[in-house]
Image (cartoon, grey):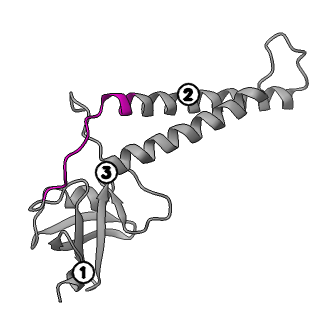
Amino acid sequence: MPSEPAPISEAARHALEQELADLRTERGTVAATLRDSDAEVGDSADEADELQRADDLRRLDDRISDITTRLRQAEPAGPPPTDLVGVGSTVAVRFSDGTVETVQIGETAAVLDRTLVTADSPLGSALLGHRAGDTVNFEAPDGPASAVVVSLGESPDRSG
């Protein structure tokens, strides 16, 4: 584990702030369903539900704490590198079946953004630190795979 927190992009900061707001809302909802410890105890199903809500509350508190710490400690990330793949880079990648996809390397995945690859995913971590022309190997859902970094910065079909 690094001694200093990784820099955070403005988009990742915004996504974490939104997640934090959503978690705090969810926490308030869950906390409101917990009974007072002096309240009368019902049957074992009621107790099981109460334990589940308490577990949910602990999970929410842990995530809220993690995000709060990350937001407080992280320095803003500068612009993505232009010669090496880094967080924030836009990368055109050719897979072994010949298809070329343009992806952006991000810190957190936005919901339904199919072009965003997180830096800690198998493909994202394989791409980090590589240049155009490099071949990377990674573990795909179907097994080992490889891809070639075609270009950094923009999609290859925009170069016309």
Point out the image quarter for the N terminus: top left
Closer to the camera in the image, 146 or 4: 4
Mark 2 / mark 3, whichever is N-terminal: 2
Q: State which region is magenta.
A: 69-81
Residue matched to label 3:
120
Q: Tag 3: residue type? A: Asp
Real-space CA distance between mark 2 and mark 3, rounded to the nearest whole angstrom: 24 Å
In the drawing, does residue 119 fall left or right of residue 56? left
From mark 1 to mark 3, how far is it between C-alphas? Answer: 21 Å
- Under mark 1, the amino acid is Ser
At mark 1, the secondary structure is loop
Question: Would you identify the image quadrant in which residue 150 lies?
Answer: bottom left
Q: Do callouts 2 and 3 mark residues in contact (Cβ within 8 Å)? A: no
Q: Residue at x 30, y 64 (%)?
A: 104
Q: Position of residue 4 (x, y in %)?
A: 22, 29
Q: Are marks 1 and 2 in contact (CB under 8 Å)?
A: no
Residue with the most extreme top position: 38
Is the C-beta separation of discs 1 and 3 under 8 Å?
Answer: no
Q: Which label sits on residue 96?
A: 1
Of the 4 image quadrants, the one containing the C terminus is bottom left
Residue at (11% x, 59% y) in the render = 84
Q: Residues within 10 Å of mark 2 (few under 14, many from 20)?
A: some
Pick whichever of labels 1 and 2 is earlier in the sequence: 2
108 is within the stretch colored magenta: no
SS label for mark 2: helix
Residue position marked by numbered label 2 in the rendering = 61
x, y percentage for residue 11?
36, 51
The label nearer to you, 2 versus 3, is 2
Image height of 2 relative to 137, above or below: above
Q: Looking at the image, is mark 1 or mark 3 nearer the viewer? A: 3
Would residue 75 be counted in the magenta stretch?
yes
